[in-house]
Image (cartoon, rainbow, N blue to C red):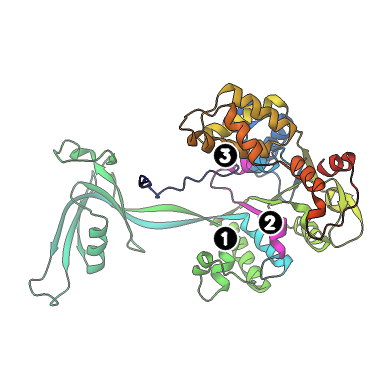
Amino acid sequence: MAELKLSESRDLTRIERIGAHSHIRGLGLDSTLEPRDVSEGMVGQTSARKAAGVILQMIKDGKIAGRAVLIAGQPGTGKTAIAMGMAKSLGLETPFAMIAGSELFSLEMSKTEALTQAFRKAIGVRIKEETEVIEGEVVEVQIDRPSASGAASKSGKLTLKTTEMETVYDLGAKMIEALGKEKVSSGDVIAIDKASGKITKLGRSFSRSRDFDAMGPQVKFVQCPDGELQKRKEVVHCVTLHEIDVINSRTQGFLALFTGDTGEIRAEVREQIDTKVAEWREEGKAEIVPGVLFIDEVHMLDIECFSFLNRALENEMAPILVVATNRGITTIRGTNYKSPHGIPIDLLDRLLIISTQPYTEDEIRKILDIRSQEEDVEMSDGAKHLLTKIGVETSLRYAIHLITAAALACQKRKAKVVELEDINRVYHLFLDVKRSTQYLMEYQNQYMFSETGEVDEDDINAMVS
């Protein structure tokens, strides 16, 4: 009888899926913007990375707005990886919106509306707000619960102190519930927002660090606050213009952000929001943070979208536009005219162009090393050498796909290190584009709707390349 194997239960609290660019941590530049050979998941493309680093520095300094950058190169030369590196290097404060060119045609709204929403997602607003906060160490929490259920509501007293003063506050039912949720006890240092009543636990007081309580490693000890209990604090909220648009345009307000049902937003709403944000800027309540909008496969846009981009880049609140394409001289969508990269000449003239070069054999080897590490696959030197040869002769993407497949073949023979035989096995199981095309040409007569006549080997190579 076959042995019953139970799959191991795994902790699903974290998303552990490995994406195509999950190994990218930044652009891999030093403090002088010089690219390191292998750093932060990036390999090679030194001139392209250096150029991206200069653009990045200009974005951080807030020197440029409404500029556009084109990353152009053959398929599999790391265009999206450079854009992802830029996003990681910018940090969470700067908005980074990412769309594919073909997305605009599949949304339930006009193309220009979809582009406007994408532009406004890439413009952040840092709003400063002053709030009154009560901050102190809890001396005592007294809660009086009525003996008869349903009689009077719960009431209580909270004693808070700083290094200079001590005050007793009367508690209502809502505050008692909030204190219970946060599990506040004497010796905790807490902050209470006066406007909303929100309680934040800052940590335990150092004076209680010698208490013989069983404490976990996550317990944080903080100093007892000094000065007065009531303080005015400046709070900074970071939102995008698109989020403000949605909240003010839909009946369900901010819930539309979670459902994704944003729909078309009226121009009047946007004008009012722009006026209000301009007022806040003059008063010093808010500042604009121009982010980055990355459009991949930009050749998929049509002439109307390109005309819109030309106009949108002239707006004073435009983000930095980064576009990527792998096309050469091709037809502009929506016209019969050909142009470099499928982009009209007038828009190309506005773009700073960064070109990516094909990877060398040595660089392919380094990339495969990083991907093996990311996918947690141990591989022998011989297997890595063979995989590098496959990457040079076919494509880098095909070689990367074979890593996990080879690891599974290795598991099947109950080994831990991927050897030459595993690579060989998956190479014959999964075809690359060139071998698939040759097979197709040999047996094309047996396929349905085959219209190809006699094809010689030169034609096959031309179609593959």
Find disc 2 in the rendering and name its residue.
317
Q: Nearer the viewer, mark 2 or mark 3?
A: 3
Q: Amino acid at mark 1?
A: Trp
Q: Position of residue 144 (x, y in %)?
A: 12, 65
The residues bearing labels 1 and 3 have C-alpha atoms spaced at a distance of 55 Å
Find disc 1 in the rendering and name its residue.
280
Q: Is residue 103 magenta?
A: yes
* Disc 1, SS: helix
* Disc 2, SS: loop
Residue stretch in magenta: 84-105
- In the rendered structure, which disc, 1 or 3, sits on the residue that comes first in sequence? 1
Q: Amino acid at mark 3?
A: Ala
Q: Residues within 10 Å of mark 2 (few under 14, many from 20)?
A: some
Q: Position of residue 234 (x, y in %)?
A: 44, 52
Front one among 410 and 59: 410
| Circle 1/circle 3 CB separation < 8 Å | no
Q: Residues within 10 Å of mark 3 (few under 14, many from 20)?
A: some
Front one among 190 and 10: 10
